[in-house]
Protein backbone atom coordinates (compact mmCIF):
# COMPACT_ATOMS: atom_id res chain seq x y z
CA UNK A 1 0.00 0.00 0.00
CA UNK A 2 2.68 2.50 1.15
CA UNK A 3 6.36 1.82 0.63
CA UNK A 4 9.32 4.01 1.56
CA UNK A 5 12.64 2.81 0.13
CA UNK A 6 15.78 4.47 1.52
CA UNK A 7 14.07 7.84 1.82
CA UNK A 8 16.04 10.84 3.09
CA UNK A 9 15.09 14.48 3.35
CA UNK A 10 17.48 17.35 3.96
CA UNK A 11 16.71 21.02 4.53
CA UNK A 12 20.11 22.58 3.92
CA UNK A 13 22.43 21.06 6.50
CA UNK A 14 19.50 19.72 8.57
CA UNK A 15 18.56 16.07 8.10
CA UNK A 16 14.81 15.60 8.62
CA UNK A 17 14.66 11.96 7.46
CA UNK A 18 17.64 9.64 7.22
CA UNK A 19 17.43 6.52 5.04
CA UNK A 20 13.87 5.54 5.95
CA UNK A 21 12.63 2.16 4.70
CA UNK A 22 9.07 1.39 5.69
CA UNK A 23 6.04 -0.55 4.48
CA UNK A 24 2.45 0.04 5.57
CA UNK A 25 -0.19 -2.41 4.40
CA UNK A 26 -3.72 -1.50 3.41
CA UNK A 27 -6.02 -1.22 6.41
CA UNK A 28 -3.30 -0.76 9.02
CA UNK A 29 -3.50 1.76 11.86
CA UNK A 30 0.01 3.05 12.56
CA UNK A 31 1.21 5.47 15.21
CA UNK A 32 4.29 7.54 14.35
CA UNK A 33 5.93 8.66 17.59
CA UNK A 34 9.08 10.45 18.66
CA UNK A 35 10.29 13.77 20.08
CA UNK A 36 9.61 17.13 18.46
CA UNK A 37 11.81 17.58 15.42
CA UNK A 38 12.27 13.83 14.96
CA UNK A 39 10.87 13.87 11.41
CA UNK A 40 7.27 12.76 11.94
CA UNK A 41 5.66 15.67 10.10
CA UNK A 42 8.22 15.50 7.28
CA UNK A 43 7.31 11.86 6.72
CA UNK A 44 3.61 12.76 6.38
CA UNK A 45 4.31 15.78 4.17
CA UNK A 46 6.32 13.62 1.78
CA UNK A 47 3.34 11.26 1.51
CA UNK A 48 1.09 14.11 0.36
CA UNK A 49 3.77 15.49 -2.00
CA UNK A 50 3.87 18.71 -0.03
CA UNK A 51 7.63 18.17 -0.05
CA UNK A 52 9.87 15.90 -2.10
CA UNK A 53 12.52 13.59 -0.65
CA UNK A 54 16.18 14.35 -1.27
CA UNK A 55 16.80 10.66 -1.96
CA UNK A 56 14.82 7.44 -2.21
CA UNK A 57 11.52 6.22 -3.57
CA UNK A 58 7.97 6.32 -2.19
CA UNK A 59 5.27 4.14 -3.72
CA UNK A 60 1.56 4.36 -3.10
CA UNK A 61 0.16 1.20 -4.59
CA UNK A 62 2.00 0.85 -7.89
CA UNK A 63 2.70 4.56 -8.29
CA UNK A 64 6.04 6.14 -7.45
CA UNK A 65 4.78 9.44 -6.06
CA UNK A 66 8.18 11.10 -6.39
CA UNK A 67 7.68 10.98 -10.15
CA UNK A 68 4.16 12.43 -10.26
CA UNK A 69 3.94 15.59 -12.36
CA UNK A 70 2.91 18.78 -10.60
CA UNK A 71 -0.30 18.85 -12.66
CA UNK A 72 -1.18 15.37 -11.38
CA UNK A 73 -0.81 16.15 -7.66
CA UNK A 74 -4.42 17.32 -7.06
CA UNK A 75 -5.78 14.08 -8.53
CA UNK A 76 -3.30 12.05 -6.49
CA UNK A 77 -4.27 13.79 -3.24
CA UNK A 78 -7.86 12.64 -3.61
CA UNK A 79 -6.63 9.29 -2.30
CA UNK A 80 -5.50 10.90 0.95
CA UNK A 81 -7.41 12.63 3.74
CA UNK A 82 -5.41 14.92 6.04
CA UNK A 83 -6.21 15.90 9.63
CA UNK A 84 -4.15 18.59 11.39
CA UNK A 85 -3.60 19.64 15.00
CA UNK A 86 -4.82 23.19 14.25
CA UNK A 87 -7.80 22.00 12.15
CA UNK A 88 -7.09 24.31 9.16
CA UNK A 89 -10.78 25.08 8.66
CA UNK A 90 -11.82 28.09 6.58
CA UNK A 91 -13.16 30.73 8.97
CA UNK A 92 -15.56 32.26 6.44
CA UNK A 93 -17.29 28.94 5.66
CA UNK A 94 -19.76 26.98 7.75
CA UNK A 95 -19.17 23.42 8.91
CA UNK A 96 -21.21 22.18 5.95
CA UNK A 97 -19.31 24.37 3.49
CA UNK A 98 -15.89 23.38 4.86
CA UNK A 99 -16.67 19.70 4.34
CA UNK A 100 -18.36 20.30 0.98
CA UNK A 101 -15.23 22.00 -0.37
CA UNK A 102 -13.47 18.64 -0.78
CA UNK A 103 -16.26 17.42 -3.06
CA UNK A 104 -16.54 20.71 -4.96
CA UNK A 105 -12.87 20.38 -5.92
CA UNK A 106 -13.65 16.87 -7.19
CA UNK A 107 -16.42 18.24 -9.41
CA UNK A 108 -19.32 16.49 -7.68
CA UNK A 109 -22.87 17.65 -8.41
CA UNK A 110 -24.74 19.79 -5.86
CA UNK A 111 -27.11 16.91 -5.15
CA UNK A 112 -24.29 14.45 -4.55
CA UNK A 113 -22.43 16.95 -2.36
CA UNK A 114 -25.51 17.53 -0.25
CA UNK A 115 -26.07 13.82 0.33
CA UNK A 116 -22.43 12.97 1.06
CA UNK A 117 -21.86 15.90 3.42
CA UNK A 118 -25.04 15.16 5.35
CA UNK A 119 -24.09 11.49 5.67
CA UNK A 120 -20.56 12.32 6.83
CA UNK A 121 -21.56 15.00 9.34
CA UNK A 122 -24.09 12.62 10.86
CA UNK A 123 -21.41 9.96 11.00
CA UNK A 124 -19.07 12.19 13.03
CA UNK A 125 -22.05 13.42 15.08
CA UNK A 126 -21.97 17.13 14.24
CA UNK A 127 -24.88 17.40 11.79
CA UNK A 128 -26.57 19.78 14.25
CA UNK A 129 -23.58 22.14 13.88
CA UNK A 130 -23.74 22.27 10.07
CA UNK A 131 -24.60 25.98 9.88
CA UNK A 132 -22.06 27.16 12.45
CA UNK A 133 -18.72 28.77 11.63
CA UNK A 134 -15.40 27.43 13.01
CA UNK A 135 -15.18 30.21 15.64
CA UNK A 136 -18.47 28.94 17.11
CA UNK A 137 -17.20 25.38 17.60
CA UNK A 138 -15.46 23.71 20.51
CA UNK A 139 -12.07 22.13 19.86
CA UNK A 140 -13.61 18.68 19.59
CA UNK A 141 -16.31 19.88 17.19
CA UNK A 142 -13.70 21.62 15.03
CA UNK A 143 -11.59 18.45 14.87
CA UNK A 144 -14.64 16.34 14.00
CA UNK A 145 -15.35 18.80 11.20
CA UNK A 146 -11.76 18.42 10.01
CA UNK A 147 -12.10 14.63 10.09
CA UNK A 148 -15.38 14.85 8.16
CA UNK A 149 -13.61 16.95 5.52
CA UNK A 150 -10.81 14.38 5.36
CA UNK A 151 -13.08 11.36 4.86
CA UNK A 152 -16.01 12.73 2.85
CA UNK A 153 -14.22 11.91 -0.41
CA UNK A 154 -13.68 8.31 0.72
CA UNK A 155 -9.86 8.35 0.63
CA UNK A 156 -7.74 5.21 0.81
CA UNK A 157 -5.52 6.76 3.50
CA UNK A 158 -6.06 9.18 6.37
CA UNK A 159 -2.98 11.00 7.70
CA UNK A 160 -3.41 12.63 11.10
CA UNK A 161 -0.67 14.99 12.30
CA UNK A 162 -1.01 15.45 16.09
CA UNK A 163 -4.84 15.57 15.83
CA UNK A 164 -5.35 15.52 19.60
CA UNK A 165 -2.52 17.90 20.53
CA UNK A 166 -4.77 20.84 21.49
CA UNK A 167 -7.67 18.83 22.93
CA UNK A 168 -8.57 17.89 26.49
CA UNK A 169 -8.25 14.15 27.33
CA UNK A 170 -11.96 13.32 27.00
CA UNK A 171 -12.32 15.09 23.66
CA UNK A 172 -9.07 13.53 22.45
CA UNK A 173 -10.43 10.06 23.13
CA UNK A 174 -13.55 10.86 21.14
CA UNK A 175 -11.38 11.82 18.15
CA UNK A 176 -9.32 8.64 18.49
CA UNK A 177 -12.44 6.46 18.66
CA UNK A 178 -13.62 8.11 15.46
CA UNK A 179 -10.30 7.44 13.70
CA UNK A 180 -10.45 3.87 14.99
CA UNK A 181 -13.90 3.45 13.47
CA UNK A 182 -12.71 4.88 10.14
CA UNK A 183 -9.86 2.37 10.21
CA UNK A 184 -12.36 -0.46 10.80
CA UNK A 185 -13.85 0.28 7.35
CA UNK A 186 -10.52 -0.68 5.78
CA UNK A 187 -9.08 2.83 5.56
CA UNK A 188 -5.36 3.03 6.30
CA UNK A 189 -4.60 5.46 9.14
CA UNK A 190 -1.19 6.96 9.95
CA UNK A 191 -1.17 9.20 13.00
CA UNK A 192 1.74 11.14 14.47
CA UNK A 193 1.32 11.84 18.17
CA UNK A 194 2.95 12.61 21.50
CA UNK A 195 -0.02 11.16 23.43
CA UNK A 196 1.48 8.26 25.34
CA UNK A 197 -1.78 7.18 26.98
CA UNK A 198 -3.62 6.81 23.67
CA UNK A 199 -0.78 4.91 22.00
CA UNK A 200 -0.35 2.52 24.92
CA UNK A 201 -4.09 1.87 25.23
CA UNK A 202 -4.79 1.08 21.58
CA UNK A 203 -1.91 -1.37 21.14
CA UNK A 204 -1.53 -0.74 17.43
CA UNK A 205 1.62 -0.72 15.34
CA UNK A 206 4.04 1.89 16.67
CA UNK A 207 6.94 3.32 14.65
CA UNK A 208 9.35 5.44 16.68
CA UNK A 209 11.50 8.03 14.91
CA UNK A 210 14.45 9.85 16.43
CA UNK A 211 16.73 12.27 14.61
CA UNK A 212 15.18 11.24 11.29
CA UNK A 213 15.78 7.51 11.75
CA UNK A 214 13.38 4.68 12.58
CA UNK A 215 14.68 3.27 15.85
CA UNK A 216 11.84 0.80 16.51
CA UNK A 217 8.84 -0.66 14.69
CA UNK A 218 6.54 -2.79 16.87
CA UNK A 219 3.35 -4.53 15.81
CA UNK A 220 1.50 -3.97 19.09
CA UNK A 221 3.76 -1.34 20.51
CA UNK A 222 3.90 1.20 23.26
CA UNK A 223 5.14 4.77 23.51
CA UNK A 224 8.11 4.33 25.81
Image (cartoon, rainbow, N blue to C red):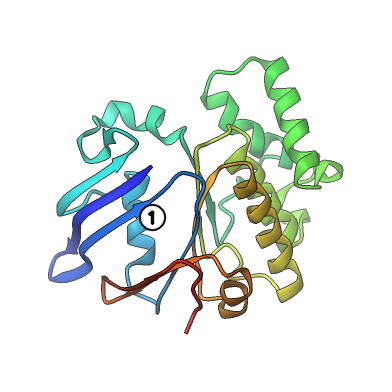
Q: Please determine whether, in this image, residue 215 is positioned above or below residue 83.
A: below
The N terminus - image quarter: top left
Q: Please determine whether, in this image, residue 81 is positioned above or below residue 116.
A: below
For label 1, the residue is 44
Can residue 91 be seen here?
no
Q: How many marks?
A: 1
User: Residue at point 74% right, 47% down?
Assistant: 133
User: Residue pushed farthest right?
Assistant: 128
User: Residue at point 71% right, 27% down?
Assistant: 116
Circle 1 packing at 10 Å, graded few (<14), some (14-19), many (20+), is many
User: Residue pushed farthest front?
Assistant: 219
Q: Please determine whether, in this image, residue 99 is positioned above or below residue 198.
A: above
Q: Position of residue 100 (x, y in %)?
A: 65, 31
Q: Position of residue 165 (x, y in %)?
A: 58, 70
Q: Position of residue 184 (x, y in %)?
A: 64, 47
User: Residue at point 18% right, 71% down?
Assistant: 14
Question: Left of 105 or right of it: where is 20?
Answer: left
Question: Left of 195 or right of it: where is 65?
Answer: left
Q: Please determine whether, in this image, residue 2 is positioned above or below residue 19.
A: above
Q: At numbered mark 1, what does the secondary structure look like: helix, strand or loop?
A: helix
Can residue 94 be seen here?
yes
Q: Position of residue 169 (x, y in %)?
A: 71, 75
Question: Left of 86 or right of it: where is 26?
Answer: left
Q: Which sits in the foreground, 217 or 85?
A: 217
Amino acid sequence: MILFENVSKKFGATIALDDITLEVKQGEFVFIVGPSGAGKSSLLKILTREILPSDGKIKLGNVDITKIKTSEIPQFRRKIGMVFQDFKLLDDRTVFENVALTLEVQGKSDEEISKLVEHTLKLVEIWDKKNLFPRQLSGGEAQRTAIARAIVGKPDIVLADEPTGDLDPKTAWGVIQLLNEINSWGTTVLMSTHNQEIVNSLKRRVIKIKAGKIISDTKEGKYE
